Image: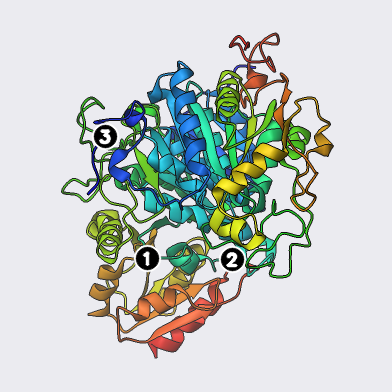
Amino acid sequence: MKGEPAVLTGQHFLLGDHACAEGALAAGCRFFGGYPITPSTEVAELLARRLPEVGGLFVQMEDELASMAAIVGASVAGARAMTATSGPGFSLMMENLGLAVMMEVPCVVINVQRGGPSTGLPTLVGQADVMQARWGSHGDYAIVAYSPASPQECFDLTVKAFNTADRFRIPVLVMADEVVAHMMERVTIPPAEAIPRVERKRPAHGPEGNGFLPFKPDDDLIPPMVHAGEGYRVHFTGLTHDERGYPALTAPAHDRLVRRLVDKVRLRESEIVEYEEYCLEDARVVIIAYGSTARSARRAVGLAREQGIAAGLLRPITLWPFPEERVKKLAERVRAFVVPELNLGQISREVERFTSLPVLGVNHAGGAMMPPEPILEAIREVAG
Amino acid sequence: MSTLIAERHPSDSLFRADRLPHIWCPGCGIGPAMHAFAQAMVESGIPLARHVCVSGIGCTGRVPGYLNMDSYHTTHGRAIPFATAVALVKPELQVTVYSGDGDLFAIGGNHFIHAARRNVDLNVICINNFNYGMTGGQVGPTTPMGARATTAPFGNYEQPFNLPHLAAATGAVFVARWTSLHLRQLKQAMLRAMKKRGFTFIEVLAPCPVGFGRPNDIGDAMEEMTLYRERCVVDPGAPLESLGIDLREKDHPITLGNFVDIERPVFDPLAMMRPAPENNAVGKRQEGQ
């Protein structure tokens, strides 16, 4: 059977999970290491068929520890690499997510959120991994996490995740949720040449001669990346290391390294942060919602406006970095914030950090999509 | 005052001399085994730039960091899945996982058996010093019954792994056991492993005079080496199930040898995409001693 091309240009009716898989293929992902877990399994199932057709490697690993280790290994060998998981698997991946941060190895993790903790609600929606995405691996680090609210965004943000990962040499998360991942909608896939592509920064010189420092950053705090087998004879370690990549187990070396790992992302936050605004021009009450919950929030805005309340929606597309500057700016002219989410208050805490205005959470632990009505009720409450 | 007696050592270019001194204790068996590996790399005829070494955590996990080659010091137990992906993405590379018994068989045990089952094109070299050395002599999955460790103060009451038996049972195509005393045989086994396609496993018994020798009245490294000389017998045909190590029984031999050397299809995620005669084929590279 002749396979389909890597970039499935055209209009399709796609499942969110499948759109993530197509986004990965379009972005040039040629290695997937994963372990089946609901509700992310469809990502793996589609890639098991599609990757071999385009000469890529699909490997079903023995667990999520191995899956995450494998994509870091694939990436140091030069491949764009990804895994997809959910809840318990995401917890297991935290170990080698930290390795990717420390070794500065680009890779992409799709986490389709379900209800937790533990096995929780394997087949039902949740949004409670948001803080785990930010802080889940031990130690200090910066992370980028995208939050798709539609199958189209599953495609677009997966492509973007690969580019952000390669640009900054970091792991990047796509924090979908079960509703978005199992929803079917129209997805437009552009022609191959129109798929944005940011390449990894590579060394200016070949491996000849001595003195190449694989972890010496340029002015942007990002070191050029060399791959296994290129002759540079590099050492990568999860230990704190110096610019040679050699272990350097001292307080000054550690502070220097961790600060750089954080700053290379933090100082570029304004270039990374993305959000969508809806009816914010004259809004007095701002809903901040993401993923599937943002879809209900949009409806709640409409219902509020029918009742004469000037409500609007700020939808973070990057959960991390969080659009804090936009929240601060809005706080200068609005009355209150309403933060609906399928957890008992995670992003609402983040909003509270940037405003002294009332922040009203609309919370459910997960298991069903957030309906518009409780959001509308909260809007009415803070609108006074 | 120390006196420089030689400008350079013939193996200098194989090591990162700027990282010396190393972290290992006097009498440790890892150093000689590392040197055997470096020599095997040179004698393999495969350019050094095509060798890659991956490790997990622990004393042996530090080996790749001292070798002047592409080296990856990963997380505890995860060297094998990391290396699996390196070997798949760049099949032209000769990828060796070099790690300790605790790393490979306790926290990393699941990865070991699955990589062996798949017959991933990897060489796994395990320095077995019967304990967790770096953390200070705790009991591990290879600690012999009765041996004392800091977390087995009354003696180990768990049955240890018989590593060659485990590796063979789970699918390794080459399985050997040597010691850090039997360096020529060890190097030859490494060379054989580098020539073979598929999952190879070499266990290297090595003294850990500080973590294991002292609490078990073995004495210093020289005495453990003497123990190896007196009790080791080379018997490649020995039944795999008989290869367990019991240090308490003074007349219980420690059996060494290249126990398994077979062929079977090498892990290839694209196997089913290839034309029928090629898919599932044994590696194209010619085998031979």
In the rendered structure, which amino acid carries the disc numbered 2? Gly
Residue nearer the viewer, B117 or A152: B117
Residue nearer the viewer, A49 or B5: B5
* Dot in front, 2 or 3: 3
Quarter that holds the C terminus of chain A = bottom left
Residue that appears at 30% across and 86% down: A356
User: In the figure, B195 relative to A138: above or below?
Assistant: above
| Residue B104 appears in the picture as rendered | yes
* Dot in front, 1 or 2: 1
Mark number displayed over residue B210: none
Q: Are marks 3 and 1 in contact (CB under 8 Å)?
A: no
Residue that appears at 53% across and 23% down: A55
Mark number displayed over residue A140: 1
User: In the figure, B28 relative to B167: above or below?
Assistant: below
* Dot in front, 3 or 1: 3
User: In the figure, A325 relative to A240: above or below?
Assistant: below
Residue, far bottom: A384
Task: For mark 3, give the secondary structure.
Answer: loop
Q: Which residue is mark 3?
A: B5
